[in-house]
Image (spheres, helix red, strand yellow):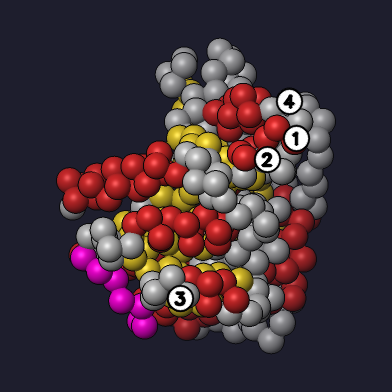
Amino acid sequence: MHEMSLADGISRIIMAQAEEHGFSKVLTVRIEIGRLAHVDPDALAFCFGAVMKGTPAESAKLVIERADGLVWCLGCAEQVAINAWGDACPKCGSFDLKADGGDGMRILDLEVE
Amino acid sequence: MCSICGCGEHKHHDHDHDHDHHHDHAHPHPHAPDQGRLLRIEQDILSENNRWAALNRKTFQEQATLALNLVSSPGSGKTTLLVKTIGMLKGKMPLAVVEGDQQTALDAQRIEATGIPAHQVNTGKGCHLDAHMVRHALETLPLGEGGVLFIENVGNLVCPAGFDLGEAAKVAVLSVTEGEDKPLKYPDMFRAASLMILNKIDLLPHLDFDVDACIGYAKRVHPNIGVIKLSARTGEGMEAWLAWIQAQQALLRVAG
Protein backbone atom coordinates (compact mmCIF):
# COMPACT_ATOMS: atom_id res chain seq x y z
CA MET A 1 0.00 0.00 0.00
CA HIS A 2 2.09 2.89 -1.30
CA GLU A 3 -0.46 5.36 0.08
CA MET A 4 1.48 5.11 3.35
CA SER A 5 4.51 6.59 1.54
CA LEU A 6 2.32 9.30 0.05
CA ALA A 7 0.88 10.14 3.48
CA ASP A 8 4.45 10.30 4.75
CA GLY A 9 5.24 12.71 1.90
CA ILE A 10 2.33 14.93 2.98
CA SER A 11 3.59 14.80 6.57
CA ARG A 12 7.08 15.92 5.55
CA ILE A 13 5.70 18.85 3.57
CA ILE A 14 3.55 19.90 6.55
CA MET A 15 6.50 19.68 8.95
CA ALA A 16 8.62 21.83 6.63
CA GLN A 17 5.80 24.36 6.38
CA ALA A 18 5.37 24.37 10.18
CA GLU A 19 9.03 25.25 10.57
CA GLU A 20 8.84 27.96 7.92
CA HIS A 21 5.57 29.56 9.00
CA GLY A 22 5.59 28.82 12.73
CA PHE A 23 2.21 27.19 13.24
CA SER A 24 1.50 24.55 15.87
CA LYS A 25 -1.79 23.09 14.69
CA VAL A 26 -3.23 22.17 11.32
CA LEU A 27 -7.01 22.29 11.10
CA THR A 28 -7.45 21.24 7.50
CA VAL A 29 -5.27 19.75 4.79
CA ARG A 30 -6.73 20.15 1.33
CA ILE A 31 -5.28 18.02 -1.43
CA GLU A 32 -6.15 17.47 -5.05
CA ILE A 33 -5.86 14.09 -6.73
CA GLY A 34 -6.31 13.65 -10.44
CA ARG A 35 -8.37 10.70 -11.61
CA LEU A 36 -5.32 9.29 -13.36
CA ALA A 37 -2.98 9.60 -10.36
CA HIS A 38 -1.42 6.43 -8.93
CA VAL A 39 -3.34 6.57 -5.68
CA ASP A 40 -6.48 5.27 -4.02
CA PRO A 41 -8.03 8.23 -2.18
CA ASP A 42 -9.73 6.09 0.49
CA ALA A 43 -6.47 4.28 1.27
CA LEU A 44 -4.67 7.62 1.42
CA ALA A 45 -7.26 9.00 3.86
CA PHE A 46 -6.78 5.91 6.05
CA CYS A 47 -2.98 6.25 6.01
CA PHE A 48 -3.18 9.99 6.64
CA GLY A 49 -4.79 9.37 10.04
CA ALA A 50 -2.09 6.88 11.00
CA VAL A 51 0.90 8.89 9.79
CA MET A 52 -0.14 12.25 11.29
CA LYS A 53 -0.25 10.97 14.89
CA GLY A 54 2.12 13.03 17.04
CA THR A 55 2.41 15.81 14.43
CA PRO A 56 0.76 19.26 14.27
CA ALA A 57 -1.74 17.69 11.85
CA GLU A 58 -2.81 14.95 14.25
CA SER A 59 -6.43 16.10 14.39
CA ALA A 60 -6.52 17.77 10.97
CA LYS A 61 -9.36 17.16 8.58
CA LEU A 62 -8.23 15.79 5.23
CA VAL A 63 -10.20 17.16 2.31
CA ILE A 64 -9.64 15.28 -0.93
CA GLU A 65 -10.75 17.00 -4.11
CA ARG A 66 -10.83 14.94 -7.26
CA ALA A 67 -9.58 16.59 -10.41
CA ASP A 68 -10.74 15.39 -13.81
CA GLY A 69 -8.47 12.94 -15.63
CA LEU A 70 -7.36 15.51 -18.16
CA VAL A 71 -5.42 14.24 -21.15
CA TRP A 72 -4.40 15.64 -24.49
CA CYS A 73 -5.93 13.63 -27.32
CA LEU A 74 -3.58 13.35 -30.28
CA GLY A 75 -6.52 12.15 -32.38
CA CYS A 76 -8.62 15.30 -32.08
CA ALA A 77 -5.82 17.60 -30.84
CA GLU A 78 -7.65 18.88 -27.81
CA GLN A 79 -7.94 18.36 -24.09
CA VAL A 80 -10.48 15.77 -22.96
CA ALA A 81 -11.16 13.92 -19.68
CA ILE A 82 -11.06 10.16 -19.09
CA ASN A 83 -11.57 8.12 -15.92
CA ALA A 84 -8.68 5.65 -16.28
CA TRP A 85 -5.85 4.73 -18.63
CA GLY A 86 -7.30 2.33 -21.18
CA ASP A 87 -10.36 4.51 -21.72
CA ALA A 88 -10.75 5.91 -25.21
CA CYS A 89 -11.09 9.59 -26.02
CA PRO A 90 -14.80 10.30 -25.49
CA LYS A 91 -14.88 12.40 -28.69
CA CYS A 92 -12.93 10.45 -31.31
CA GLY A 93 -12.31 7.03 -29.75
CA SER A 94 -8.52 7.28 -29.96
CA PHE A 95 -6.31 5.71 -27.29
CA ASP A 96 -3.44 7.99 -28.24
CA LEU A 97 -3.66 10.20 -25.17
CA LYS A 98 -1.07 12.04 -23.16
CA ALA A 99 -1.48 13.08 -19.53
CA ASP A 100 -2.36 16.76 -19.39
CA GLY A 101 -2.72 17.45 -15.68
CA GLY A 102 -5.07 14.56 -14.84
CA ASP A 103 -2.42 12.47 -13.06
CA GLY A 104 -1.31 14.98 -10.44
CA MET A 105 -1.52 14.81 -6.68
CA ARG A 106 -0.84 18.02 -4.82
CA ILE A 107 -1.32 19.60 -1.46
CA LEU A 108 -3.38 22.69 -2.27
CA ASP A 109 -3.44 24.48 1.05
CA LEU A 110 -3.36 24.14 4.81
CA GLU A 111 -5.63 25.82 7.29
CA VAL A 112 -3.48 26.38 10.35
CA GLU A 113 -3.45 28.18 13.68
CA MET B 1 -12.69 24.17 5.63
CA CYS B 2 -14.71 26.19 3.20
CA SER B 3 -17.35 28.23 5.07
CA ILE B 4 -19.24 29.18 1.92
CA CYS B 5 -20.09 25.92 0.21
CA GLY B 6 -19.09 23.51 2.99
CA CYS B 7 -16.76 21.59 0.68
CA GLY B 8 -14.57 20.72 3.63
CA GLU B 9 -17.47 18.66 4.87
CA HIS B 10 -17.71 16.89 1.57
CA LYS B 11 -16.79 13.29 2.08
CA HIS B 12 -14.95 11.89 -0.86
CA HIS B 13 -16.63 8.93 -2.47
CA ASP B 14 -15.79 6.86 -5.47
CA HIS B 15 -17.87 4.62 -7.66
CA ASP B 16 -17.88 2.80 -10.93
CA HIS B 17 -20.96 4.13 -12.64
CA ASP B 18 -20.77 6.76 -15.33
CA HIS B 19 -22.42 10.05 -14.76
CA ASP B 20 -21.89 13.62 -15.74
CA HIS B 21 -21.04 15.30 -12.48
CA HIS B 22 -17.56 15.32 -11.07
CA HIS B 23 -16.54 15.79 -7.49
CA ASP B 24 -14.32 18.80 -7.70
CA HIS B 25 -15.66 22.27 -8.11
CA ALA B 26 -14.35 25.38 -9.74
CA HIS B 27 -14.12 27.43 -6.56
CA PRO B 28 -15.05 30.88 -7.86
CA HIS B 29 -15.35 32.00 -4.23
CA PRO B 30 -12.40 32.66 -1.93
CA HIS B 31 -11.53 29.98 0.59
CA ALA B 32 -11.94 32.06 3.72
CA PRO B 33 -10.78 30.13 6.76
CA ASP B 34 -13.21 29.81 9.68
CA GLN B 35 -10.65 30.06 12.40
CA GLY B 36 -7.15 29.55 11.17
CA ARG B 37 -5.16 31.15 8.43
CA LEU B 38 -4.86 29.60 5.03
CA LEU B 39 -1.45 28.70 3.64
CA ARG B 40 -1.34 28.04 -0.06
CA ILE B 41 1.10 25.20 -0.70
CA GLU B 42 0.51 23.91 -4.24
CA GLN B 43 3.18 21.25 -3.79
CA ASP B 44 3.41 17.82 -5.41
CA ILE B 45 2.99 15.09 -2.78
CA LEU B 46 5.78 13.15 -4.50
CA SER B 47 8.11 16.14 -4.54
CA GLU B 48 10.64 14.62 -2.14
CA ASN B 49 10.83 11.36 -4.08
CA ASN B 50 11.12 13.35 -7.29
CA ARG B 51 14.04 15.35 -5.89
CA TRP B 52 15.95 12.14 -5.17
CA ALA B 53 14.98 10.74 -8.55
CA ALA B 54 16.38 13.83 -10.28
CA LEU B 55 19.64 13.40 -8.35
CA ASN B 56 19.84 9.72 -9.35
CA ARG B 57 19.11 10.61 -12.97
CA LYS B 58 21.96 13.14 -12.92
CA THR B 59 24.33 10.50 -11.54
CA PHE B 60 23.25 8.05 -14.26
CA GLN B 61 23.80 10.69 -16.95
CA GLU B 62 27.24 11.60 -15.61
CA GLN B 63 28.25 7.94 -15.68
CA ALA B 64 26.51 7.29 -19.01
CA THR B 65 24.70 4.47 -17.24
CA LEU B 66 21.41 3.16 -18.58
CA ALA B 67 19.14 2.59 -15.57
CA LEU B 68 16.21 0.24 -16.16
CA ASN B 69 13.46 -0.23 -13.58
CA LEU B 70 12.05 -3.75 -13.94
CA VAL B 71 8.52 -4.07 -12.63
CA SER B 72 6.09 -6.98 -12.58
CA SER B 73 3.89 -9.07 -10.34
CA PRO B 74 5.68 -11.66 -8.18
CA GLY B 75 6.77 -14.75 -10.10
CA SER B 76 6.94 -13.28 -13.60
CA GLY B 77 10.55 -14.43 -13.91
CA LYS B 78 12.36 -11.10 -13.48
CA THR B 79 15.34 -12.53 -11.63
CA THR B 80 15.78 -15.43 -14.06
CA LEU B 81 15.53 -12.94 -16.94
CA LEU B 82 18.21 -10.81 -15.27
CA VAL B 83 20.55 -13.73 -14.66
CA LYS B 84 20.23 -14.80 -18.32
CA THR B 85 20.63 -11.21 -19.55
CA ILE B 86 23.75 -10.71 -17.46
CA GLY B 87 25.17 -13.96 -18.82
CA MET B 88 24.82 -12.61 -22.37
CA LEU B 89 25.95 -9.00 -21.70
CA LYS B 90 28.77 -9.63 -19.24
CA GLY B 91 32.13 -8.55 -20.63
CA LYS B 92 30.46 -6.32 -23.24
CA MET B 93 29.57 -3.51 -20.85
CA PRO B 94 29.70 -2.79 -17.09
CA LEU B 95 26.64 -4.13 -15.27
CA ALA B 96 25.18 -3.71 -11.79
CA VAL B 97 21.92 -4.67 -10.12
CA VAL B 98 19.74 -3.25 -7.35
CA GLU B 99 17.41 -5.91 -5.97
CA GLY B 100 14.24 -4.87 -4.18
CA ASP B 101 12.33 -7.35 -2.02
CA GLN B 102 10.42 -7.12 1.21
CA GLN B 103 12.79 -9.61 2.81
CA THR B 104 15.81 -11.88 2.17
CA ALA B 105 18.95 -11.37 0.10
CA LEU B 106 18.17 -14.41 -2.06
CA ASP B 107 17.84 -12.47 -5.32
CA ALA B 108 21.03 -10.47 -4.75
CA GLN B 109 22.83 -13.76 -4.08
CA ARG B 110 21.57 -15.16 -7.40
CA ILE B 111 22.91 -12.06 -9.17
CA GLU B 112 26.24 -12.07 -7.31
CA ALA B 113 26.73 -15.68 -8.37
CA THR B 114 27.04 -14.33 -11.93
CA GLY B 115 30.00 -12.18 -10.84
CA ILE B 116 28.12 -8.88 -11.14
CA PRO B 117 27.88 -6.39 -8.24
CA ALA B 118 24.43 -6.42 -6.64
CA HIS B 119 22.88 -4.51 -3.78
CA GLN B 120 19.85 -5.89 -1.99
CA VAL B 121 17.31 -3.43 -0.64
CA ASN B 122 14.85 -4.90 1.84
CA THR B 123 11.80 -2.71 1.99
CA GLY B 124 10.41 -4.46 5.09
CA LYS B 125 6.71 -3.74 5.01
CA GLY B 126 7.17 -1.43 2.04
CA CYS B 127 5.65 -2.41 -1.29
CA HIS B 128 7.92 -0.54 -3.69
CA LEU B 129 11.37 0.96 -4.08
CA ASP B 130 11.63 4.72 -3.84
CA ALA B 131 14.29 7.02 -5.21
CA HIS B 132 15.87 7.58 -1.80
CA MET B 133 16.46 3.83 -1.33
CA VAL B 134 18.12 3.67 -4.75
CA ARG B 135 20.26 6.69 -3.81
CA HIS B 136 21.61 4.77 -0.83
CA ALA B 137 22.19 1.67 -2.96
CA LEU B 138 24.33 3.80 -5.29
CA GLU B 139 26.66 4.64 -2.38
CA THR B 140 28.07 1.13 -2.43
CA LEU B 141 27.31 -0.02 -5.96
CA PRO B 142 29.95 0.72 -8.59
CA LEU B 143 28.50 2.06 -11.86
CA GLY B 144 30.71 1.60 -14.89
CA GLU B 145 30.90 4.22 -17.63
CA GLY B 146 28.60 3.23 -20.49
CA GLY B 147 27.01 0.37 -18.59
CA VAL B 148 23.59 -0.74 -17.43
CA LEU B 149 22.06 -0.65 -13.96
CA PHE B 150 19.13 -3.02 -13.60
CA ILE B 151 16.79 -2.13 -10.75
CA GLU B 152 14.55 -5.09 -9.96
CA ASN B 153 11.60 -3.58 -8.15
CA VAL B 154 9.44 -5.31 -5.56
CA GLY B 155 7.04 -7.75 -7.27
CA ASN B 156 3.90 -5.63 -7.37
CA LEU B 157 1.97 -4.33 -10.37
CA VAL B 158 0.44 -1.40 -8.49
CA CYS B 159 2.66 0.58 -6.17
CA PRO B 160 5.96 0.91 -8.09
CA ALA B 161 4.14 2.62 -11.00
CA GLY B 162 4.03 6.01 -9.28
CA PHE B 163 7.60 6.20 -8.02
CA ASP B 164 10.24 7.60 -10.33
CA LEU B 165 13.64 6.17 -9.35
CA GLY B 166 15.55 8.26 -11.89
CA GLU B 167 15.50 5.42 -14.42
CA ALA B 168 15.65 5.88 -18.18
CA ALA B 169 12.75 3.46 -18.60
CA LYS B 170 10.42 1.16 -16.73
CA VAL B 171 10.24 -2.33 -18.19
CA ALA B 172 7.11 -4.30 -17.30
CA VAL B 173 7.63 -8.07 -17.33
CA LEU B 174 4.44 -10.06 -17.81
CA SER B 175 4.58 -13.84 -17.97
CA VAL B 176 2.13 -15.73 -20.14
CA THR B 177 1.08 -17.82 -17.13
CA GLU B 178 -0.72 -14.69 -15.96
CA GLY B 179 -3.90 -13.38 -17.57
CA GLU B 180 -3.69 -11.55 -20.91
CA ASP B 181 -5.93 -8.86 -19.44
CA LYS B 182 -3.31 -7.71 -16.91
CA PRO B 183 -2.56 -4.49 -18.87
CA LEU B 184 -6.22 -3.47 -18.54
CA LYS B 185 -6.46 -4.54 -14.90
CA TYR B 186 -3.28 -2.67 -13.94
CA PRO B 187 -3.23 0.17 -16.48
CA ASP B 188 -1.09 2.56 -14.44
CA MET B 189 1.89 0.23 -14.62
CA PHE B 190 1.63 -0.47 -18.35
CA ARG B 191 1.09 3.24 -18.92
CA ALA B 192 4.29 4.00 -16.99
CA ALA B 193 6.37 1.32 -18.74
CA SER B 194 8.22 1.98 -22.00
CA LEU B 195 8.55 -1.71 -22.77
CA MET B 196 6.46 -4.80 -22.03
CA ILE B 197 8.30 -8.11 -22.00
CA LEU B 198 6.09 -11.15 -22.47
CA ASN B 199 8.07 -13.84 -20.68
CA LYS B 200 7.79 -17.65 -20.56
CA ILE B 201 6.57 -17.91 -24.17
CA ASP B 202 7.93 -21.48 -24.26
CA LEU B 203 4.84 -22.37 -22.19
CA LEU B 204 2.35 -20.95 -24.73
CA PRO B 205 1.47 -24.36 -26.27
CA HIS B 206 0.18 -25.45 -22.86
CA LEU B 207 -1.86 -22.33 -22.15
CA ASP B 208 -4.87 -20.42 -23.47
CA PHE B 209 -3.02 -17.10 -23.25
CA ASP B 210 -4.01 -14.85 -26.18
CA VAL B 211 -0.81 -12.98 -27.13
CA ASP B 212 -2.46 -10.65 -29.65
CA ALA B 213 -5.21 -9.69 -27.21
CA CYS B 214 -2.62 -8.98 -24.51
CA ILE B 215 -0.60 -6.72 -26.81
CA GLY B 216 -3.81 -5.01 -27.94
CA TYR B 217 -4.75 -4.29 -24.32
CA ALA B 218 -1.27 -2.93 -23.58
CA LYS B 219 -1.44 -0.67 -26.65
CA ARG B 220 -4.85 0.57 -25.60
CA VAL B 221 -3.39 1.73 -22.30
CA HIS B 222 -0.14 2.93 -23.88
CA PRO B 223 -0.08 3.09 -27.70
CA ASN B 224 3.69 3.62 -27.85
CA ILE B 225 4.68 0.75 -25.55
CA GLY B 226 7.32 -1.55 -27.02
CA VAL B 227 6.71 -5.30 -26.87
CA ILE B 228 9.25 -8.13 -26.81
CA LYS B 229 8.21 -11.78 -26.56
CA LEU B 230 10.80 -14.08 -25.05
CA SER B 231 11.59 -17.06 -22.90
CA ALA B 232 14.40 -16.46 -20.42
CA ARG B 233 14.49 -20.24 -19.89
CA THR B 234 15.02 -21.33 -23.51
CA GLY B 235 16.66 -18.12 -24.74
CA GLU B 236 14.09 -17.57 -27.51
CA GLY B 237 13.63 -13.83 -28.12
CA MET B 238 16.54 -12.83 -25.88
CA GLU B 239 18.43 -11.27 -28.81
CA ALA B 240 15.64 -8.72 -29.34
CA TRP B 241 15.79 -7.78 -25.66
CA LEU B 242 19.59 -7.35 -25.76
CA ALA B 243 19.29 -5.27 -28.93
CA TRP B 244 16.71 -3.07 -27.19
CA ILE B 245 19.06 -2.55 -24.22
CA GLN B 246 21.97 -1.70 -26.50
CA ALA B 247 19.84 0.72 -28.51
CA GLN B 248 18.68 2.45 -25.32
CA GLN B 249 22.28 2.67 -24.11
CA ALA B 250 23.31 4.22 -27.44
CA LEU B 251 20.41 6.69 -27.26
CA LEU B 252 21.62 7.74 -23.83
CA ARG B 253 25.00 8.70 -25.25
CA VAL B 254 23.39 10.69 -28.05
CA ALA B 255 21.10 12.46 -25.59
CA GLY B 256 23.97 13.01 -23.11
For label 3, the residue is B112
C-alpha gap between disc 2 and disc 3: 28 Å
Disc 2 + disc 1, Cβ < 8 Å: yes
Is label 2 on the same chain as label 1?
Answer: yes
Residue B203 tag number: 2
Disc 3 + disc 4, Cβ < 8 Å: no
Label 2 chain ID: B
Give the mark nearest the N terminus, 4 or 1.
Answer: 4
Going by the numbered disc 1, the residue's amino acid type is: Leu
Give the mark nearest the N terminus, 3 or 4.
Answer: 4
Q: Residue at x 80, y 35 (%)?
A: B16
Q: Residue at x 57, y 40 (%)?
A: B198
Give the mark nearest the N terminus, 4 or 2.
Answer: 4
Whether the magenta-drawn stretch holds residue B164 is answered as no
- Crowding at dot 2, Cα within 10 Å, few <14 / some 14-19 / many 20+, comes out as some
- Look at the picture and state if A72 lies above or below B30: above
Going by the numbered disc 3, the residue's amino acid type is: Glu
Question: Where on the picture, by quarter, is residue B143?
Answer: bottom left
Q: Residue at x 56, y 13 (%)?
A: A92
Q: Is residue B204 visible?
A: yes
Label 1 chain ID: B
Considering the numbered disc 2 on the image, is that residue within a helix, a strand or a loop?
Answer: helix
For label 1, the residue is B207
